[in-house]
Amino acid sequence: MTTQNGATVTDPSGVRIELDHVSKIYPGATTPAVDDASLDIPAGEIVVFVGPSGCGKTTMMRMINRLSEPTSGRIRIGDQDALSIKPTELRRKIGYSIQQAGLFPHMTIRQNVGLVPGLLRWDRKRIDSRVDELLDLVGLEPGQYADRYPRQLSGGQQQRVGVARALAADPPVLLMDEPFGAVDPITRSTLQDELLRLQTELRKTIVFVTHDFGEAVKLGDRIAVLGPRSKVLQYDTPQTILASPADDTVAGFVGSGASLRQLGLMRIKDVELRDHLAVSADDTVEQVRTKLADCEFDWAVVVDQRHRPVKWVRESRLRHAATLSDAVEDLDVVSTHSTLEDALEAILAEQHASAVVTGPSGRYAGVVTLDTLIDTITRLRAEANAETSEP
């Protein structure tokens, strides 16, 4: 542990990665897929490679674990030359998560997650303990999911298992190749929040590939904007790239929605949450009516026994309901790790000008309101205008 400005910060368990003038030319190709690329990736950070299809971003990432062998250049992981390590040994020390999870369909979830520890000859008790720990970490109850097969899980659940498998041997480096690209937008946002939550605890070095600049802004401590042949057009923080694109090509890739994406730079944990009535899923209709009558709201969040929000209920729907389950409605939630952009989308999707927020362990934390977002946007615009008007 270290202390910064009075706050305790977890030391990174990840290591620095250095790509030094790395190139890749496939046999028979006339031009390199990656041409003389150099990057310094700090330990414990999420660095996102973003660029158009075919620019070589996946190839550059795959050279880190030698799934694609570099033609020239040097790659260092921590204090080791990656090219001096046997590829199979190297890959067992680097987690790898891909789109659609890549799980083995004939293996149970426990077997999938425990695969690499098994190859490293961990004993069975240690493997089982690690699998249970990781499934719980990614929000899947081990007793409920460990003995299922991938086909018995939703796409989002499979991606969670894919992340758990990548983390199984506690690698310092995690490579993620568009891991959330095949799921629906709501599930995708939830998985992004989960990754950010995990990273606050684990502090791995994560290299993440995407073609979605909004995802890069949300996840990245730094973003590498890549052009043809993985030329590094700009490598900086999301804030700097949004505010000062390096050239017209980067500005075009950032797009006209850059001002809205400023909302993607602030987390819900950075704004004030409002208390809002929560009722238990075990309450009777009469109990909920009484609670609503005693407060200023005409709707309530419904939480389970672990105080996790599962539904919401309007007062008007209670009038003719025999049980609470007859009146509840589906609920989309955001987490304290979600961005204000996520919150705005959730508010627009709901009918009560608020987004329900979860904190640690998915527990109900309060709501973020449309008024809060409007006040924040107004303040951000005022600050931006003040900066541009300075001589």
Image (tube, rainbow, N blue to C red):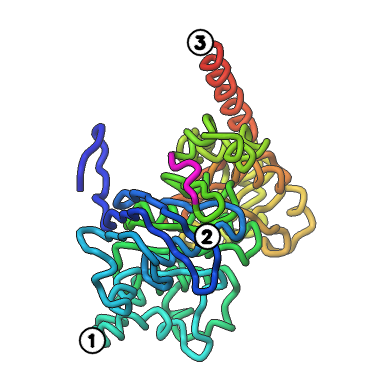
Across and down, in percent, residue 385 comes to 58, 17
Q: Give the residue furthest to the right.
A: 320
Tag shown at residue 56: 2
Q: Label 3: which residue?
A: 390
Which quarter of the figure has residue 122? bottom left
Dot 1 or dot 3: first in sequence order is 1
Of labels 1 and 3, the one closer to you: 3
Label 1 Cα crowd, 10 Å radius (few <14 / some 14-19 / many 20+): few
Left of 327 or right of it: where is 364?
left
Amino acid type at circle 1 is: Asp
Dot 1 or dot 2: first in sequence order is 2
Q: Which residues lie in the magenta part?
A: 231-236
Answer whether residue 223 is visible to the viewer in this image.
Answer: yes
Which quarter of the figure has residue 90? bottom left
Residue, x 61% and y 44% (percent of image)? 355
Residue, x 57% and y 40% (percent of image)? 250
Answer whether residue 337 is visible to the viewer in this image.
Answer: no
* SS type, badge 3: loop
Q: Report how far apart the C-alphas of labels 1 and 2 lie in the structure.
A: 39 Å
Badges 3 and 2: C-beta atoms under 8 Å apart?
no
Label 3 Cα crowd, 10 Å radius (few <14 / some 14-19 / many 20+): few
Q: Label 1: which residue?
A: 123
